[in-house]
Amino acid sequence: MHNLAYSLFSYFMQLLKMPSPKARRNGSRSGSVSGICGNSVNGRFDFGAVSPRRSVDYSSRRRASSFSSASAFVIGTQSQDNAKRLNLSLLTIAFRFLLAIDLWLSKRLGVCTCEDSLLGSMRPLVKLVEVSGHGVPWLMSAAYGLVHSDSAADLETMLNLLMALVLDMALVGIVKAIVRRRPPSQSRSDMFMPLAVDRFSFPSGHATRAAMCAHLMLTHLVPAAAAPLHALVLAWAGLVGLSRVLLGQSNVTDVLFGLGLGYCHYSLVERLWLSPERLQDILTTFLQNRLAGA
């Protein structure tokens, strides 16, 4: 009997220690929440384990977005560089194509290069036309006209012609020294009184001089009513340039550029035109400055 009572008392005490169903449900919920969100300490949830994961995710997303932005920028830069290279390559191809046409045409037109050429028998006549556009005969003619001028108008014209010739030779020499283009391969070094810059062919000095002198003669020497003389002067300028190509001394582009450059040279001479009054003012100012410096 005593043992039975003791057993009942022990069973009753175990029943008192067991949690209720509600408590067990709350415990299971808290356990599941704590398992998902964090640990429960003294009835409080600890979310400390969640924050690092979220920060890591945010940092990874930020790095991914930065990497994607950098990749897009690099791709855009590369596409722009490729477009520039493509444009440069197209320009280079076009330039080389035009240069090849120029060399081929210049070689085909060099029919008076030597006596054995296609029109070698006409070489002396073509050479005479070429010499008519040389700088030395023009300088000598301008100096002679300047000394033996009978009127103020002739003196003014010869003075400006001499200045134009010197200016033309200086500018053509500068351009030739910069470009340094060699003459055609079939050229022969039999030029009348060659200069140092005549080793290069771009631009043609004969063509620039012919265009400039022709424009000056048509403006100041040839009467406006003399149409045949106008045609003759223009034909002479064109033949001087053509003679350089026929003799194989210059390329086609050398002559064409020279004719355009000669026209620009005359426009510059017109801006710097020296009248007797202006020349007198320049000489007076120069002498006054020299006397003041002395």
Image (tube, rainbow, N blue to C red):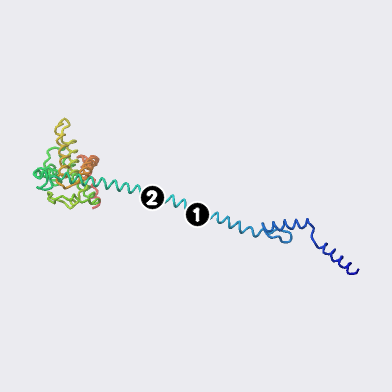
**Residue 56 locus on image (x, y percent):** 58, 58
- Report crowding for label 1: few under 14, some 14 to 19, many 20 or more residues within 10 A (C-alpha): few
In the image: residue 5, left or right of residue 83: right
Which of the 4 image quarters holds residue 225? top left
Element type at mark 2: helix
Residue extending farthest bottom: 2
| Residue at which label 1 appears | 67
Query: Can you say which quadrant of the picture contains the N terminus?
Result: bottom right
The answer to which of 98 and 291 lies nearer the viewer is: 98
In the image: residue 14, left or right of residue 136: right
Residue extending farthest top: 225
The answer to which of 124 and 48 lies nearer the viewer is: 48
Residue 204, label in figure: none
In the image: residue 91, left or right of residue 42: left
Element type at mark 1: helix
The three-letter code of the residue at mark 2 reads: Asn
**Residue 196 locus on image (x, y percent):** 17, 53
In the rendered view, would you say 25 is above or below 163?
below
The three-letter code of the residue at mark 1 reads: Phe
Query: Residue shown at 84%/64% (left/top)?
Result: 11
**Residue 182 locus on image (x, y percent):** 20, 51
In the rendered view, would you say 7 is above or below 196?
below
Whether the residues at callouts 2 and 1 have beta carbons within 8 Å, the answer is no
- Report crowding for label 2: few under 14, some 14 to 19, many 20 or more residues within 10 A (C-alpha): few
The answer to which of 122 and 198 lies nearer the viewer is: 122
| Residue at which label 2 appears | 82
Gap in angstroms between the C-alphas marked 2 and 1: 22 Å
The answer to which of 40 and 48 lies nearer the viewer is: 40
